[in-house]
């Protein structure tokens, strides 16, 4: 079969710019599509943090290209750099007016323009290079206007006549809602009839909702989350619309990049290990305890947390249970996270109250994230909702037993431990309450005390395979279904 031309557009691509799973997914998906010989153009902004990093090559035919957004004309240029561990070029949209700023995301007034420009630039690039994509694959609210742009501003161009669009919802909690007075700046002033009228009446435009209306296919990052967002509890106001489009909504669980996350070869951890020889795991635990000044005891389980610190991740369940647990049980806790101050304050307080048992590091630190995965015995993800979640899959590969809430991708990737059959890979709880979480932790601690059970749990988890090799085929099958026959 002919290779597909896929234009994949994202606000984050690892390792260039990452705040969460979106970056891992777009990088790995592009890499694996490329490996399977598809013609992929991965497009992202050139943020300030990239200056002086990597080896960028300006593309001669894509320099200083004007894009009108309302009254203002912006100019963008494109440079490429290789996606690490592949020969694939990543296309970086340079527009200093919009991207030469401190963060990947900002609270600035023109945040909508930063990503409208990315969307427009990706389509303009196709035109300037006369490259007709079979698939435009946009991700989250940032690029969710692309299907509508193709239907309106670019509809005249035969280049896109056969182009089909896919929108992946990585997290429905972020929708990109702006005032309808911004329509002109978005280039959609005369396209009002295509927008969601109730929102317009209330003076709003919702990027993600617009994408949901017009993308040919919608995907989200786990089968359970695809079901959950069609319900009013987790649909965040978009459930009715998603129910209408349920025939075009597919759950495809994210893959794991085992070149990056593999205890046998991970260069970011002090001691490597594998399922037959776990001594390195214990050495990592001891070294991590020493690094943070925690009292090391091989018999005391180490619980790890690596996370964005936001309400989504369920940390408000912890204050009711952790102090008592830490007081009564011989456990250690290491937390790495960045995000909301209230959670940082809490973990700082907890580390102060239990200096020999709890360590907290604020900030984003990829090597430490690997080390925590490798060193921990248990990994805690009490998420309120979790579209897919990657850390629980990393945990499994590192012999670290996940304790998770049964939601979204956590429900799809962690199988409950059954002490009788000795099947399962972790511990799950349903109710979003401190009591339910505590009960799951207690079950985990009971299994920890049974050496045979714990080894089996670790082995079961390490044998699971969530590699992209499989997951990428699901995307390819979907793309093929959408692309019209010649
Ligand atoms: P989300 O996308 O909601 O943040 P995921 O579990 O899908 O959650 O992906 C999180 C990714 O970000 C993982 O690769 C995880 O290791 C990484 N990560 C999250 N917080 C940090 C942090 N503070 N330091 C380093 N890596 C982090």
Image: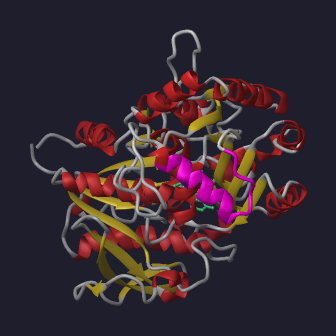
Quadrant assignment for ligand 1: bottom right
Q: Determine the residue positioned at 50% across, 32% down.
A: 458
Horizontally, residue 119 falls left or right of residue 444, namely: left
Q: Where does the magenta region start and end?
A: 280-297
Specify the principal SS of the magenta part. Answer: helix
Q: Residue furthest top?
A: 420
User: Foreground residue, 402 or 109?
Assistant: 402
Q: Determine the residue positioned at 49% across, 25% down.
A: 456
Q: Can residue 51 be seen in this view?
A: yes
Q: Determine the residue positioned at 65% across, 29% down.
A: 448
Q: Determine the residue positioned at 41% across, 63% down.
A: 267
Quadrant placement of the N terminus:
top left
User: Foreground residue, 248 or 309?
Assistant: 309
Picture layout, residue 165 above or below residue 244: below
Horizontally, residue 437 falls left or right of residue 142, namely: right
Q: Is residue 192 visible?
A: no
Residue 130 coordinates in the image, percent (x, y): 18, 70
Horizontally, residue 325 falls left or right of residue 55, namely: right
- Residue 402 falls inside the magenta stretch: no
């Amino acid at each position: 079969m002919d290779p597909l031309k896929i234009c994949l557009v994202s606000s984050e691509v690892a390792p260039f710019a990452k705040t969460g799973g979106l970056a891992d997914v777009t990088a790995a998906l592009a890499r694996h599509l490329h490996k399977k010989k598809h013609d992929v153009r991965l497009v992202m902004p050139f943020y300030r943090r990239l200056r002086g990093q990597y080896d960028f090559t300006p593309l001669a035919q894509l320099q200083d290209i004007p894009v009108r957004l309302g009254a203002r004309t912006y100019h963008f240029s494109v440079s490429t750099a290789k996606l690490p561990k592949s020969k694939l070029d990543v296309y970086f949209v340079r527009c200093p007016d919009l991207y030469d700023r401190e963060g990947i995301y900002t609270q600035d007034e023109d945040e909508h323009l930063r990503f409208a420009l990315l969307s427009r630039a990706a389509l303009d690039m196709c035109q300037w290079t006369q490259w007709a994509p079979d698939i435009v694959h946009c991700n989250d609210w940032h690029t969710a206007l692309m299907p509508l742009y193709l239907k309106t501003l670019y509809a005249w161009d035969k280049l896109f006549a056969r182009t089909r669009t896919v929108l992946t919802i990585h997290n429905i909690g972020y929708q990109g809602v702006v005032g309808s007075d911004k329509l002109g700046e978005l280039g959609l002033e005369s396209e009002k009839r295509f927008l969601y009228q109730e929102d317009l009446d209330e003076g709003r435009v919702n990027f993600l909702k617009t994408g949901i209306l017009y993308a040919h296919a919608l995907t989200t990052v786990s089968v359970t989350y695809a079901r959950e967002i069609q319900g009013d509890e987790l649909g965040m106001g978009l459930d009715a619309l998603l129910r209408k489009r349920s025939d075009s909504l597919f759950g495809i669980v994210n893959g794991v990049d085992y070149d990056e996350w593999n205890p046998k070869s991970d260069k970011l951890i002090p001691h490597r290990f594998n399922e037959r020889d776990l001594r390195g795991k214990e050495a990592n635990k001891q070294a991590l305890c020493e690094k943070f000044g925690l009292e090391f005891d091989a018999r005391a389980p180490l619980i790890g947390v690596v996370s964005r610190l936001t309400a989504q991740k369920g940390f408000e369940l912890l204050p009711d249970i952790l102090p008592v647990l830490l007081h009564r049980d011989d456990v250690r806790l290491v937390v790495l996270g960045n995000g909301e101050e209230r959670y940082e304050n809490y973990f700082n307080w907890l580390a102060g109250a239990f200096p020999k048992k709890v360590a907290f590091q604020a900030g984003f630190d990829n090597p430490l994230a690997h080390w925590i995965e490798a060193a921990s015995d248990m990994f805690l993800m009490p998420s309120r909702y979790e579209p897919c979640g990657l850390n629980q899959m990393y945990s499994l590969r590192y012999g670290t037993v996940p304790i998770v809430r049964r939601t979204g991708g956590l429900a799809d990737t962690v199988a409950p431990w059954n002490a009788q059959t000795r099947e399962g890979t972790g511990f799950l709880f349903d109710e979003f309450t401190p009591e339910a979480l505590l009960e799951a932790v207690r079950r985990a601690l009971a299994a920890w005390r049974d050496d045979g059970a714990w080894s089996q749990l670790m082995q079961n988890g390490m044998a699971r395979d969530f590699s992209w090799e499989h997951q990428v085929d699901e995307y390819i099958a979907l793309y093929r279904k959408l692309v019209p026959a010649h």
